[in-house]
Image (cartoon, rainbow, N blue to C red):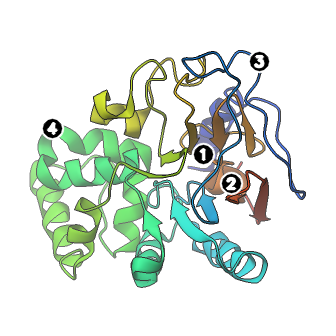
Amino acid sequence: MKRDVQERARRLISRLVPGGQRGRWRVPSAGTSHATPHGAPQGPPRPEHPVAVIGDIHGRMDLLERLLDKLAAEAPDARPVFVGDYVDRGAESRAVLERLRALGSSATCLMGNHEAMLLEFLDDTLERAGRWLRNGGRETLASYGVDLAESPDIDALMAARDAFAEALSDGTERWLRARPLFWQTGNLLVNHAGPDPARPISAQQDDVFLWGHRRFLRDARRDGLWVAHGHWVRPDARAGDGRIAVDTGAWAFGRLSAALILPDGRLRFIDVRGRGMA
């Protein structure tokens, strides 16, 4: 099991891109290639009020609590906006979901691809279970007290599905299904993975918000939007070319990050660290 986790971590490392700024305020630059349709350079992200965009948690309740405490101390007026992927891989998915639900209307929690896979498991178990279980679903089931063998038969799989659905019947399933795909304030758009930079937000396919478009990390947007996102693991949170990346591998590398963005365009990153699995 540990060897499998280490191998997954190595694959993640191969996708990492150097960069990032932490610990001080700065006004991010969009880069010379990023312009509005009229050719003027894009300005900094300007939310209507202070925002803290928080990266993928993946069952790391320890890091979540520490980051929330840090944000409360350093940025009490900032609205927390979570980019999704609260469950799977880490050991405390249930505790994470319960904590996020308890925040109520004081925070915005978006849908990630792992929440989408969880719901697919409930809706189409026989067809969709494999993908979710291979990507951390077993850890989520275990956090709810649902055990599942490595190679379950159909009866065992359906029994696990039913037990899980019962555990979520306290309102958690309903809450998960209600998660929006994106959230916007001013020229800042927050989503999980990254929409197509060549198309307006209103013309996007739902899947790109969850899984990312192939052009998202390659091409700059030309509509003046800054897109804050998770999903793509990096060694450091960073901002540039109209993108703000905040997934720093909480489950594997023990680091959970947030981007604190102010209406005047200033941005800085706040993170907490713990033990990783890599």
Cα–Cα span, label 2 and label 4: 30 Å
Q: Which mark is residue 5?
A: 1
Left or right? Give the position of 168 relative to 35.
left
- Label 3, label 1: how far apart the Cα atoms are: 40 Å
Query: Residue drawn at (63%, 71%), measured in percent from left and top?
Result: 78
Q: Which comes before the other along the chain, label 3 or label 1?
A: 1
Depth order, front residue of 206/261: 261
Q: Is residue 270 above or below residue 201?
A: below
What amino acid is found at the position of numbered circle 3 in the picture?
A: Thr
- Residue under the point 30% across and 48% down: 116
Mark 4 or mark 3, which is nearer the start of the sequence? 3
Q: Residues within 10 Å of mark 3 (few under 14, many from 20)?
A: few
Q: Name the one closer to the observer, 245 or 76.
A: 76
* Residue 98 visible in the displayed image: no
Of callouts 3 and 2, the N-terminal one: 3
Residue 41 in the image: state x and y as whole percent: 71, 24
Determine which residue is flagged by label 3.
32
Mark 2 neighbour class, 10 Å CA radius: few under 14, some 14 to 19, many 20 or more: some
Distance of mark 2 from mark 1, alpha carbons? 7 Å
Q: Label 1 neighbourhood size at 10 Å, few (<14), some (14-19), many (20+)?
A: some
Cβ atoms at labels 3 and 4 below 8 Å apart: no
Q: Measured along the vertical axis of the image, is residue 134 above or below residue 111?
A: above
Per the image, label 4 sits on a secondary structure element best described as helix
Residue drawn 52% across the image and 62% down it: 81
CB atoms of marks 2 and 1 within 8 Å: yes
What residue would you read off at disc 2?
277
